[in-house]
Image (cartoon, rainbow, N blue to C red):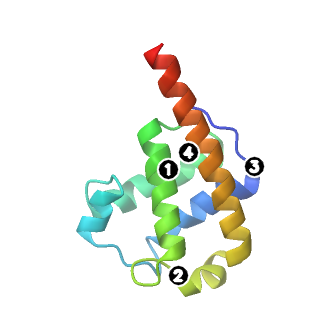
Amino acid sequence: MSVELADDEREVLRRGLAEWGGPASCTEALAVAMGFRSVAGLLEDGGRLRAALAAGEPLSPQDWRRVVTATEIVFASDVFGSGLDWSITTGFSDEQTIKILRRLQRTISRTLHGARHRLDG
């Protein structure tokens, strides 16, 4: 499923996924809660998803949910994610990131919701 995103939106998602391989500390339970099979799966799928985002390739609805959820958590949580270090490690301020995340949430939610209704109808 293709979702039209601005460059900064794609970059925040890419950086969010990359943070799990850096300063973030994911548990197996959290990886599974985010929709990945394990921490190893998060890291492995994260690389594939980062490449797909960079190339502007479509993702499955499940992948869109996982990408957004992983980015939300890694941005906000100082326990599991980058938290207070986010702006240092990604170059995006907290203010920029929250605005971008809200746009992403609206865009991706609307796209996924519309696709579900087209499939049901």
Numbered circle sitting on residue 52: 4
The part of the image, by quadrant, that contains residue 96 is bottom right
Q: Position of residue 22 (x, y in %)?
A: 47, 77
Q: Are marks 2 and 1 in contact (CB under 8 Å)?
A: no
CA–CA distance in space, label 2 to label 1: 22 Å
Q: Residues within 10 Å of mark 2 (few under 14, many from 20)?
A: some
Residue found at x 52% / y 75%? 76
Looking at the image, residue 97 sits to the left or right of residue 41; the answer is: right
Q: Is residue 76 above or below residue 42?
A: below
Which element carries disc 3, helix, strand or loop? loop
Q: Secondary structure at mark 2?
A: helix
Q: Is residue 58 above or below residue 24?
A: above
Image: 51 above or below 13? above
Instruction: Give the mark toward the camera: 3 or 4.
Output: 3
Q: Which residue is label 1 attached to? A: 49
In the rendered structure, which disc, 2 or 1, sits on the residue that comes first in sequence? 1
Callout 1 secondary element:
helix
Q: Amino acid at mark 1?
A: Leu
Q: Amino acid at mark 2?
A: Gly
- Amino acid marked by disc 4: Ala
Residue at x 33% of width, y 52% of height: 35
Instruction: Name which quarter of the figure residue 79 lies in.
Output: bottom left
Picture coordinates of residue 120, whole percent (x, y): 44, 17
Q: Badge 4: how crowded within 10 Å, few (<14), some, or many (20+)?
A: some
The reply to whether discs 4 and 1 touch (Cβ–Cβ < 8 Å) is: yes
Image mark for residue 110: none
